[in-house]
Image (cartoon, grey):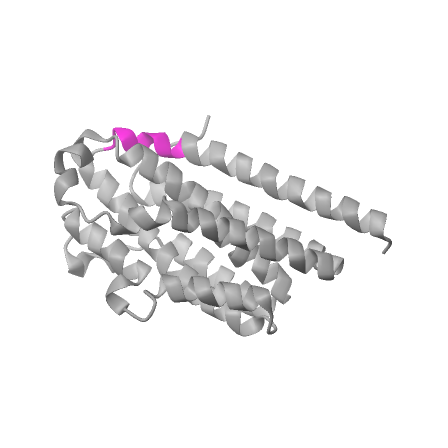
Amino acid sequence: MDQQTTQALKEEFWRMADNARNQTEYLADSKLQYLQYAPLDVLKRIFVQYRYFTIFYISDLALLVYRLPFGKLRSLLADFLNDELGNGNHDQAHQQIYDDFLVSLGIPQEELQANANRTNLQILREISDLVMTEYPWYAVGLRGMGGECLCQVYLAAMHAHFTKNPAIQAMKDRLDWKFWDIHTGEVDIEHRELMRAALMEAVDEDPAVLEDLVGGYRKSKGVFDQFWDNIFEAAGVHIHAA
């Protein structure tokens, strides 16, 4: 593949990635506006369903680190994984601090494991299978790019809307905000930028990885959209993006 063709493919790839992110921002914002006025019991059901994504994402990131060859991207994702696991402190693991938020919202600890949406659990298990069975670069697009770039879009929209809800405003001083401080702040933005830089370097070294990256990233976008549709369905809410 000559240099001109390689450059054209790289530019097309990043246009696709940016376009997918823009589409996700639009869909996420359209769907999650409902959180501004949803009853508190519905908010709780929605928050609990999202919990399962956080749990599976951490495990999938560990699988992705396992599958990648030694190099800059593997070390970077391992660093992200360390952050997700609390940098050696279980109490600060992201799954735990999300649970801390749920408990502060008034959800009993024993209810956090209950009533998972079966369709979403199936989707998450299928994603884990793909991380282990597809080509590593497909898995990078699926859980590396998808997890760091698209997941943050939904979290940002979720936070922007639910924090305006009157029920949340009434209890905001007693809620545990640590999870949201991390995932809607500079840390997640920095992760996204580091991920993009590492991928650009990887594509420069081997343009052949582009096809698998694109495939995984597109799959990830479809998964996010379906996952949130299922969350609303599990919460008894029927919303269609405009």
Q: Is residue 135 left or right of residue 46?
A: right
> In the figure, 37 relative to 11: above or below?
above
The image quadrant where one finds the N terminus is bottom right
Tell me if residue 114 can be seen. no
> In the figure, 15 relative to 98: above or below?
above
Residue at screen point 62% across, 56% down: 199
Q: How many marks?
A: 0
Q: Is residue 35 magenta?
A: yes
Q: Nearer the viewer, residue 19 or 135?
A: 19
Q: Is residue 84 left or right of residue 194?
A: left
Q: Is residue 184 left or right of residue 102?
A: right
- Across and down, in percent, residue 18 comes to 59, 39
Question: Residue furthest toward the top?
Answer: 242
Residue at screen point 43% across, 36% down: 28
Tell me if residue 11 can be seen. yes
Q: Nearer the viewer, residue 79 or 236?
A: 79
Which residues lie in the magenta part? 31-38
Overall secondary structure of the magenta section: helix
Place residue 212 in its image quadrant. Answer: bottom right
> In the figure, 215 relative to 153: above or below?
below
Residue at screen point 35% across, 57% down: 52
- Across and down, in percent, residue 6 comes to 79, 51
Residue at screen point 57% across, 64% down: 73
Place residue 154 in its image quadrant. Answer: top left
Q: Nearer the viewer, residue 23 or 205?
A: 205
Q: Nearer the viewer, residue 169 or 89?
A: 89
- Across and down, in percent, residue 61 comes to 47, 64
- Across and down, in percent, residue 56 comes to 40, 61
Q: Is residue 214 left or right of residue 107?
A: right
Q: Is residue 62 magenta?
A: no
